[in-house]
Amino acid sequence: MTDLTDQVAIVTGASRGIGRAIALLLALQGARVVAVARAAAELDELTLKTQGLAIPADVSDEDDAQRIVDETLARFGRLDILICNAGVGSFNLLENFEAAEWDRIFDVNVKGTFLLCKAAVPHLKAQGSGHIIGIASDVSRRTFEHGTIYGASKYAQDALLGSLRKEVRPYGVKVSTIYPGLVDTYFNDSKPGSPEAERTHLRPSDVAQAVRYVLEAPAHVVVDELMIHPLSQEW
């Protein structure tokens, strides 16, 4: 089993929800966590808990993406884990969407993953090790009404990660994709913690435990893909 002690991990979308749960769990396992999100105040509070590094940034901005990796390397001297978790979504009939909403969702979900990987991969290849994990969605593998833009973005993110997996495997770098079903978070302006959601949804900590499972696989093992659902959700 891979030991996460002193592993340097960038976690995007870390200010709340799944990203926060991942950052806290990795810190508990001894990792040095670089927490990334737009919300600087929430990141500062998280950093006090993880004793890591907070970087307020927009993952869809190329300069910010490069700065995240550069600041991580300047602080810790290496990068071992990249968790591409930042994501947004909205749901409507296709004809009711504005083009700007397409841009917003694809910029974060797809472009953000692309830019962070682009900045990180040269360093991971050079050191001959590392692990990239994309937090996708079960809608990377299915479609649903009102999910035209969000679903399309998650299909695109999944394809990006799948192709990257083939590119970096010869260099000893792992790429894994996790596909959660319904999760009780702030996603799409939801308010977590309702009795109904607690009964029918995954918790952010469930996804964090899936990340831990993937990361702790032995060095010769890569978990390419992992899908998790609440028992109440029919696939």
Image (cartoon, rainbow, N blue to C red):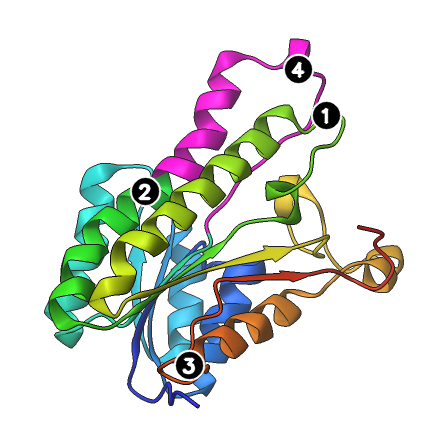
Q: Eyeballing the image, is 103 above or below 118?
A: above
Q: Eyeballing the image, is 67 above or below 221?
A: above
Q: Which residue is mark 4?
A: 94
| Sequence-first disc among 4 and 1 | 4
Label 1 sits on a secondary structure element that is loop
Task: State the residue at coordinates (58%, 59%).
Answer: 17
Q: CA distance from mark 2 to mark 1?
A: 25 Å
Q: Which residue is mark 2?
A: 114
Give the number of the mark in front: 3 or 4.
4
Q: Which residue is mark 3?
A: 27
| Sequence-first disc among 2 and 1 | 2
Examine the structure image and report whether residue 109 is included in the region drawn in magenta.
Answer: yes
> Which label belongs to residue 146?
1
Give the number of the mark in front: 3 or 2.
2
Residue that protrudes farthest toward the top in the picture = 95
Task: State the residue at coordinates (44%, 76%).
Answer: 215
Q: Is 143 situated left or right of 225 in this image?
A: right
The amino acid sitting under disc 2 is Phe
Specify the segment rendered in magenta: 86-111
The amino acid sitting under disc 3 is Ala
| 74, 120: nearer the viewer | 120
The amino acid sitting under disc 4 is Leu
